[in-house]
Amino acid sequence: MEAVVQLYGGGSVVLAPLLEWETTLTGGVPCDSFYLKCPYHAAQAALLERAWRVTLQEKGTVLLRAVVDETEIVQNGAGRTLEISGRGLAALLLDNEAEAVTYTRPTLSELLRRHAAPYGLSWGMFSELQGQAEYSVSSGESQWRALEGFTRWVGGFVPRITAEGLLLPAAWKDNGRRFMIGAGTPLLELRWQDRRYGVYSEVLVVDKVRRQRQRVEHTAFLDRGGCCRRVLYVPGRSSSAAMRYTGQYQIERSREGARQLTAVLPGRQGAAPGSVIRMERSDIGIQGDFYVEEAAYCCNAAGETTTLRMRRLEE
């Protein structure tokens, strides 16, 4: 693994061979992150003042492009080391607040120009989206939330950012490829979590001015005996479609991470966020297809491991 530090104003530094490193890839929020440790030399002190971005790569393949959040120089009995940590480029949108604005007939292109382009994010080809009603961004919301709120509302998806830093303003599509974890796959740990607390079974959206109510149900949770209702009041100008969207959004947020499978495997595995893992572990009763939401790769003195956090594909 090679780490290259880009300096603000120009130039870059290739760090000494890494002693330890860890990357966590999500493609969204919480955003990608990294930590690395390498030998340190005094000549690097002045350069670190301008440390701006980090590119982690291996054999010409970029594993992560990220923002530098923190650098630390450590001297102890083991010698002098440099530690750097940071987050993926989604941090540029998460860290910057948007101004309050209301769009009359917003388009995805307009949202990208206003909320992503000024922070250095680029994107490829995408299908245009246009809202048929007003879309408002509140003061203090992050630029990420301004963009994500629109794509959820109009397109029904959350944008993603690749490890290389490219914004993908489109819904994820299953390419049909499957990685396998079967009875013979070596596993260091396997954990299935099913959390019910905090998951909404129903959201009642109430417009007191127009005297309208929209009930949005989480059918799958209700079918399992879930019972957790929330009542949400919205401004009088909300349309019926906007009220339904608000209720569905609250349910989706409440269920995030509620049912997840975590697998820790030895070595570096090829699965990344967006990959699909086919589980065939009848010995513990976990089978089916799982979508990788987070992939963490760690390398230290004990060797390399891969940790995959997944949810069922149909959920």
Image: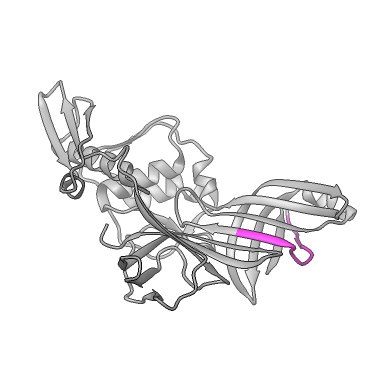
Residue 176 in picture, x, y percent from top left: 32, 76
Q: Is residue 228 left or right of residue 268?
A: left
**Which quadrant holds the C terminus?**
bottom left
Q: Is residue 98 magenta?
A: no
Looking at the image, residue 15 sits to the left or right of residue 181; the answer is: right
**Observer-nearest of 101 and 286:** 286
Indicate whether 192 appears above or below 178: above
Quarter holding the N terminus is bottom right
Check the image and name the residue furthest to the front. 283
Of 33 and 200, the residue lying toward us: 200
Could you say which is closer to the camera, residue 204 or residue 289?
289
Estimate the x, y position of residue 67 in percent, counting from the top left: 62, 51
Q: Is residue 59 above or below residue 23?
A: below
Magenta part of the chain:
10-22
- Which residue occupies the foreground of this view, 158 or 251? 251
In the image, 250: left or right of 14?
left
